[in-house]
Image (cartoon, rainbow, N blue to C red):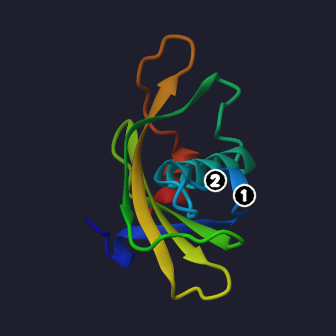
Amino acid sequence: MEKKEAERKLLCVFRIQVRWADLDANRHVNNVAYFTFMEQARIDWLKRMELQTTAQNEGPVVVQTSCNYKAAIPYVEALDVHVYGGAPGRTSFPTFYDIVSVEDPTLKYADGQAVMVWTDRTSGQSRPVPDALRKLLTP
């Protein structure tokens, strides 16, 4: 299910160059690579916001993820992964992704989402989403 633009906020755009290693036997990008592209974009954004692991040893973990494949990605394609955030709950927050062609931004290869839970890295227990992150995510 695709979220309405009003329910999500653009957090960043991460550029990825498709590698030969991303291809499958059919000579297009393997379906698993789409998840890696979303993961790379999400982690890059979290690191730049200093939220991948905080000084309090807290950070997000993925509890659910999905991908809707729209078109096969060919080799020698440059991609932009648009990362969006949605309204956070008490301990969790949604992230959304659009994978598009750099050359033709109207060509959407996939969209996806991941639900993240904020956790204590030592105990593994969920923790409230920090206010700083909450402000970044809120549409």
Say which element carries label 2. Answer: helix
The residue lying toward the viewer, choosing from 73 and 102, is 73
Residue at position x 44%, y 74% from top?
71
Residue at position x 68%, y 73% from top?
77
Q: How many marks?
A: 2
Q: Residues within 10 Å of mark 1 (few under 14, many from 20)?
A: few
As shown in the figure, which amino acid type bears the numbered disc 2? Asp
Residue at position x 49%, y 48% from top?
32
> Mark 1 and mark 2 in contact (Cβ < 8 Å)?
yes
The residue lying toward the viewer, choosing from 108 and 11, is 108
Q: Is residue 93 visible?
A: yes
The residue lying toward the viewer, choosing from 51 and 3, is 3
Q: Is residue 139 visible?
A: no
- Dividing the picture into quarters, in which one does residue 12 lie? bottom right
Q: Is residue 11 left or right of residue 72?
A: right
Q: CA distance from mark 2 to mark 1?
A: 5 Å
Say which element carries label 1. Answer: loop
Q: Is residue 30 left or right of residue 50?
A: left
As shown in the figure, which amino acid type bears the numbered disc 1? Arg
Residue for badge 2 = 22
Quadrant, the N terminus: bottom left
Quadrant, the C terminus: bottom left
Q: Is residue 47 left or right of residue 84?
A: right
Q: Position of residue 3 (x, y in %)?
A: 31, 69
Where 110 sits versus 126, above or below? below
Residue for badge 1 = 19
